């Protein structure tokens, strides 16, 4: 297999770039936020759905952590900029051959957060709500192609004979659901499950793994960027802090409660 040193260096460089983008977004929104902005930290675990079968999910959970900035338009709708980092990996099978992978990932997303109940962080009249999330995002991770390993279950694959070690920036469709509650005038606590549909098939180091060469100039494919099996799943808790408390409640909040 290729050396991991280049992957580690690329991961470190990408992490710095994503953090800079995230901080820039936070400062951009903070210029408008004033009475309606929150920041939060997030911690939990990652899992995976993809081409592999018989995945041992108990052994495939890995730690994830991150942070987010949330701009609240009103008690129902918010916009969240979120950065998560950690590892994703799994142990299982591809066809009848054992397969596993483990890699560092960096995830940046912009999500609309829609509350089922009116919710204002810190107000007693809006103590708790469930919510939905959806938006757009990107995920960065390394991709290692090992033709010899693929040949175990697909001897006529079309991946060539050269090992590759690449960096991937994949577009994602992030969505999820959760529940959040107040635990103080400035603090909120939440539990959520987040999904990432990747528009790339390389998360598990299996890029259209059953594709094969049917002869000179003839390639048989089963997946593409829009139709593949790779999903990342994040499950975790988040702690939210209200970064500004004005003297009066914003009128769009439909509340007469004063801070």
Image (cartoon, grey):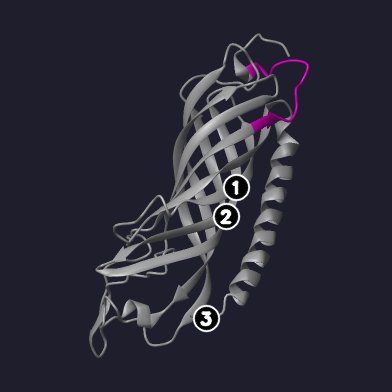
Q: How crowded is mark 1: few (under 14 residues within 10 Å), some or many (20 or more)?
A: some
Q: Taking 37 as reference, is 201 above or below it?
A: below
**Up-down: is 125 above or below 222?**
above
Tell me which label, 2 or 1, sits earlier in the chain.
Answer: 1
Image location (x, y in percent) of residue 189: 59, 28
In the rendered structure, the answer to whether residue 80 lies left or right of residue 178 reads right
Residue furthest to the right in view is 247
Are circles 3 and 1 on residues that touch, CB within 8 Å? no
Q: Mark 1 points at which residue?
A: 65
258 and 90: which one is in front? 90
Distance between the alpha carbons at the discs numbered 2 and 3: 21 Å
How far apart are the two marked residues, 3 and 1, measured between alpha carbons? 28 Å
| Residue 167 relative to residue 195: left or right | right
**Can you give x and y, in whole percent of width and height, for residue 19 in the image?**
68, 54
Q: Is residue 195 in the magenta section? A: no
Task: Please name the residue that numbered disc 3 is placed on.
Answer: 2
Q: Earlier in the sequence, mark 3 or mark 1?
A: 3
Residue found 36% across the figure and 68% down from its top: 99
Instruction: From the viewer's side, name the closer residue of 227 and 158.
Output: 158
Marks 2 and 1, how far apart in space?
6 Å
Measured as percent of width and height from the top left, residue 14 is found at 64, 64
Q: Magenta span covers which residues?
A: 240-251
> Residue beneath label 2, please?
86
Residue in the picture at 72% in, 35% down? 32
Label 1 secondary element: strand
Q: What element carries label 2?
A: strand
N-terminal of the pair, mark 2 or mark 3, is: 3
Looking at the image, residue 124 sits to the left or right of residue 92; the answer is right
In front here: 104 or 69?
104
Q: Is residue 68 above or below residue 22?
A: above
The answer to whether mark 2 and mark 3 are in CB contact below 8 A is no
């Amino acid at each position: 297999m290729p050396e991991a040193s280049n992957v580690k260096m690329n991961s470190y460089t990408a992490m710095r770039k994503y953090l800079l983008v995230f901080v820039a977004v936070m400062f951009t929104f903070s210029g408008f936020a004033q009475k309606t902005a929150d920041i939060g930290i997030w911690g939990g675990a990652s899992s995976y759905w993809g081409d592999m079968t018989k995945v041992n999910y108990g052994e495939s959970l890995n730690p994830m952590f991150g942070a987010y900035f949330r701009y609240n338009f009103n008690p129902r709708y918010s916009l969240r900029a979120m950065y998560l980092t950690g590892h994703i990996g799994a142990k299982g099978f591809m066809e009848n051959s054992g397969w596993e992978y483990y890699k560092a990932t960096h995830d940046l997303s912009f999500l609309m957060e829609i509350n089922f109940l009116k919710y204002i962080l810190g107000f007693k009249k809006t103590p708790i709500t469930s919510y939905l999330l959806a938006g757009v995002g990107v995920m960065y991770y390394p991709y290692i192609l090992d033709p010899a390993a693929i040949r175990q279950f697909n001897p006529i694959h079309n991946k060539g004979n050269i090992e590759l070690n690449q960096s991937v920036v994949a577009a994602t469709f992030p969505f999820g659901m959760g529940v959040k509650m107040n635990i103080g005038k400035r603090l909120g606590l939440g539990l959520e499950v987040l999904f990432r549909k990747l528009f790339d098939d390389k998360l598990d180091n299996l890029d259209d793994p059953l594709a094969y060469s049917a002869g000179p100039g003839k390639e048989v494919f089963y997946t593409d960027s829009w139709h593949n099996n790779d999903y990342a799943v994040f499950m975790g808790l988040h702690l939210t802090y209200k970064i500004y408390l004005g003297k009066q409640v914003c009128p769009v909040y439909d509340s007469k409660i004063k801070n």
